[in-house]
Amino acid sequence: MKQAEFERQFNFFRNRVEHAEKFSDYEGFALAICYVKLGEFLMAQKLFEKSCLAMFGQRPDWRLAAHSSWLVDVWVLSGRKDLYPKIVEALDVFRKENIKSIVNSLLTQYSCGIVELLHPTGMDISQSIRNLTAKPSIKDMYAIGQVFQAILDRDKNAVNTAMEKLLVAHQGQAKHGMLRETPEGFISMPGMSLAYAAHQYGLDLDIVSEYFSADYLAFLLEYSK
């Protein structure tokens, strides 16, 4: 990550958020990511929380963009476990109101899968895992499917290996792809969410990457006790 690009993004979203009475869910979590990178974790958590709450409002960015992953990742990173019922409700409404191609998208299957991992209801996510791993060329989704399976198997080594693949895929998107000009590129939110889920299964991971904050994960686990 180039420092000049980080400062540009940080200053832009800080001005958008901190000088406004109301800000969008995307603006909130974009700035939260920047604060994670700065090590200001309480500020980051509060912004993730505000962003998550904004996602339940009228015409939030995540629904306009059909990015259900934003909803669940920001929820996880907010530490607000008590919002689980509202997350499930929002996902249900999203799935009912959208066309089949969106409902069955890999992003939606990831979103529903991470929620099921964190709050098991008995739903079988094996088909989602097969769909996520069906196309190795979609590197991030393929790795996510592998992480899902490894967590269910409680295989720490397999989780670490798949997480490394996910973060390498994220690096490619951050440097050369669609995430190169957005704070989403600074941290892999799915990577953070999956590591949080792995911890709930007793798996403490060994991850070193500029796109992953082990320190924020530790903060979040303590905050959400």
Image (tube, grey):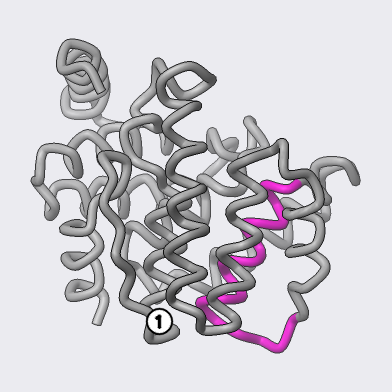
Is 19 in front, or is 124?
124
| Label 1 secondary element | helix
Instruction: Give the dominant element type of the magenta stretch: helix, strand or loop.
Output: helix
Q: Does the magenta-highlighted stretch encompass residue 12?
A: no
Magenta-drawn segment: 106-123
Three-letter amino acid code at disc 1?
Gln
Is 155 in front, or is 105?
155
Residue farthest along the right direction in this orientation: 100
Image coordinates for residue 42, horizontal then vertical, percent = 12, 54
> In the visual, does 46 lie left or right of 188?
left
Task: Name the quarter where the N terminus is drawn.
Answer: top left
Residue 120 in the image: above or below residue 144: below
Residue under the point 24% across and 51% down: 213
Q: Does the magenta-highlighted stretch encompass residue 117?
A: yes
Image coordinates for residue 169, horizontal then vertical, percent = 51, 37
Disc 1: which residue: 200
Q: Circle 1: is it few (<14), some (14-19), or many (20+) Cα within 10 Å?
A: some
Residue 109: which quarter of the image? bottom right
Residue 14: which quarter of the image? top left
